[in-house]
């Protein structure tokens, strides 16, 4: 069987944005569930980024967004609903919110003015006082002048003036942001990422409940994101800077990609949209596969999405500690049968739960990125191609043998090669060229894009200015 496949010719955009040298002040947005924290975040940043749904508990992790007001830039950290006297998943969500409040420069405390002060609001207030951080109180859901009286009651919380605001309509948001800027420190913290070009970006993707968040927490050495046995716990894409192998990486933990995209509704729909956006922002994708279960169509579709996006690829087979001999036998057969088209992707067998071989992910990621960045000089490429074609010329097509005039590498990240020919090259021959490129130049962990431009011989009509659609060769 061949190890290549053709893909549609859509060049996915890349977000090659440089990381900012200075660290922005951080604002933690906290409050009990369903008071409108994520809606207020969306209002402040001016776009729908935070997942919003009219049910409590949609946001579960702390998620950072860039924001600015009056020329001042800062980072908003949206958190899950803060509840007291809870256990399990709800307790972990509350723990994330408390951690965000303790590490922020200022706190935006959101309360539902239409409900008034609850026991949970009072309990949260006691914790906020202990953080010794400036607190700005947002009295949300004040949609008209008649509801401003409800906001006055919130003075009794004892954390300062309540600022009436409507996250839904934007009412009062300007005054709230003015107060927020007054609460921020004049200068950002002295700490710096000290990364000139910014850390390399790694997306952790896979179907729900394969262990993406567990792996992120294992690599970070702490509970950065919420982990639960319930599939779909992660709803937002979470960026985390993690020190591994002597360097800093930006890991993007994404919501699990679900089976039927068109059937998604509400929070899961927007989470799936953001998963694709996270992949576009990444340079390399680590696809997690659950070895305790058979490889699913979802797994193959996710891998195909990575290749189509042109990102470097690493396959991480998680839950290896749960594997017995019988399952290992059948797993190897599944890999040979279903993943033969991405044999070029580095493979790491890990256990996010126990930490088994997690350290081997860094060398695999580095190999993929090195291939992804590789450029071959035109002279070297054509010398190699001349020898290859002399030994194995293209097959005859329609009674004529096409010739390869020359080749060039048009781009890297991922490597894109253009073959200038006198005729069409069969798929099998292009796959042969791709395989030999991998054998002789490496490209382990990176997809290769191969395009053709067919030129007719002089005196036989005008030269063709078009080009045959490019192929993504796996």
Image (tube, rainbow, N blue to C red):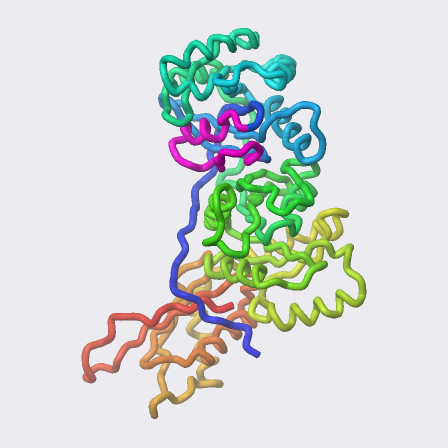
Residue 218 is left or right of residue 459, and the answer is: right
42, 193: nearer the viewer: 42
Query: Residue placed farthest to the right in the image?
Result: 325
| Residue 138 appears in the figure | no
Residue 343, magenta (yes or no): no
163, 132: nearer the viewer: 163
Q: Quadrant of residue 417?
A: bottom left
Q: Can you say whether 82 is above or below 164 in the image?
A: below
Which range is magenta? 34-59
Q: Can you say whether 17 is above or below 182 in the image?
A: below
Q: Quadrant of residue 193?
A: top right
Residue 53, magenta (yes or no): yes
Residue 138 percent across, percent down from the top left: 48, 17
Q: Can you say whether 38 is above or below 266 in the image?
A: above
Q: Can you say whether 438 is above or below 411 in the image?
A: below
Residue shown at 50%/63% (left/top)?
447
Residue 18 percent across, percent down from the top left: 45, 40
């Amino acid at each position: 069987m061949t190890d290549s496949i053709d893909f549609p010719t859509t060049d996915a955009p890349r977000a090659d944005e440089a990381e900012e040298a200075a660290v922005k002040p951080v604002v933690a947005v906290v409050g009990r569930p369903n008071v409108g924290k994520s809606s207020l975040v969306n209002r402040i940043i001016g776009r729908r980024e935070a997942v919003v749904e009219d049910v409590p508990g949609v946001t579960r992790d702390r998620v950072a967004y860039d924001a600015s007001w009056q020329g001042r830039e800062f980072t908003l950290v949206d958190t899950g609903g803060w509840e007291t006297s809870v256990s399990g998943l709800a307790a972990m969500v509350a723990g994330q919110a408390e951690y965000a409040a303790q590490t922020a420069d200022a706190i935006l405390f959101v309360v539902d003015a239409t409900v008034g002060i609850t026991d949970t609001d009072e309990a949260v207030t006691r914790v906020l006082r202990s953080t010794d951080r400036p607190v700005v109180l947002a009295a949300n859901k004040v949609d008209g002048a008649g509801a401003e009286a409800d906001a006055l009651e919130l003075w009794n919380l004892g954390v300062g003036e309540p600022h009436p605001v409507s996250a839904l309509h934007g009412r009062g948001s300007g005054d709230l942001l003015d107060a927020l800027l007054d609460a921020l420190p004049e200068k950002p913290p002295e700490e710096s990422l000290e990364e000139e070009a910014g850390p390399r970006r790694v997306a952790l993707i896979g179907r729900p409940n394969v262990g993406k968040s567990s792996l992120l927490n294992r690599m970070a050495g702490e509970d950065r994101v919420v982990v639960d046995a319930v599939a779909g716990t992660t709803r937002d894409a979470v960026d985390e800077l993690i020190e591994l192998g002597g360097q800093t990486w930006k890991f993007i933990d994404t919501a699990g990609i679900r089976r039927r995209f068109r059937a998604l509704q509400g929070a899961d729909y927007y989470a799936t949209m953001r998963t694709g956006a996270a992949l576009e922002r990444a340079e390399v994708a680590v696809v997690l596969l659950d070895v305790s279960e058979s490889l699913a169509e979802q797994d193959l579709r996710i891998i195909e999405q990575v290749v189509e996006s042109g990102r470097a690829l690493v396959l991480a087979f998680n839950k290896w500690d749960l594997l017995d001999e019988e399952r290992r036998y059948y797993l190897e057969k599944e890999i040979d049968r279903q993943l033969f088209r991405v044999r070029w992707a580095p493979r790491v067998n890990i256990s996010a739960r126990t930490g088994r071989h997690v350290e081997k992910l860094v060398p695999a990621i580095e190999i993929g990125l090195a291939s992804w960045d590789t450029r071959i000089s035109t002279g070297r490429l054509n010398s190699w191609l001349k020898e290859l074609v002399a030994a194995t010329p293209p097959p005859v097509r329609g009674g004529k043998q096409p010739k390869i005039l020359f080749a060039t590498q048009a781009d890297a990240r991922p490597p894109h090669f253009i073959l200038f020919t006198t005729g069409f090259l069969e798929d099998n021959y292009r796959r042969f060229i791709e395989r030999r490129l991998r054998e002789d130049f490496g490209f382990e962990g990176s997809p290769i894009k191969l395009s053709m431009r067919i030129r007719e011989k002089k005196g036989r009509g005008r030269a063709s200015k078009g080009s045959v659609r490019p192929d993504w060769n796996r």
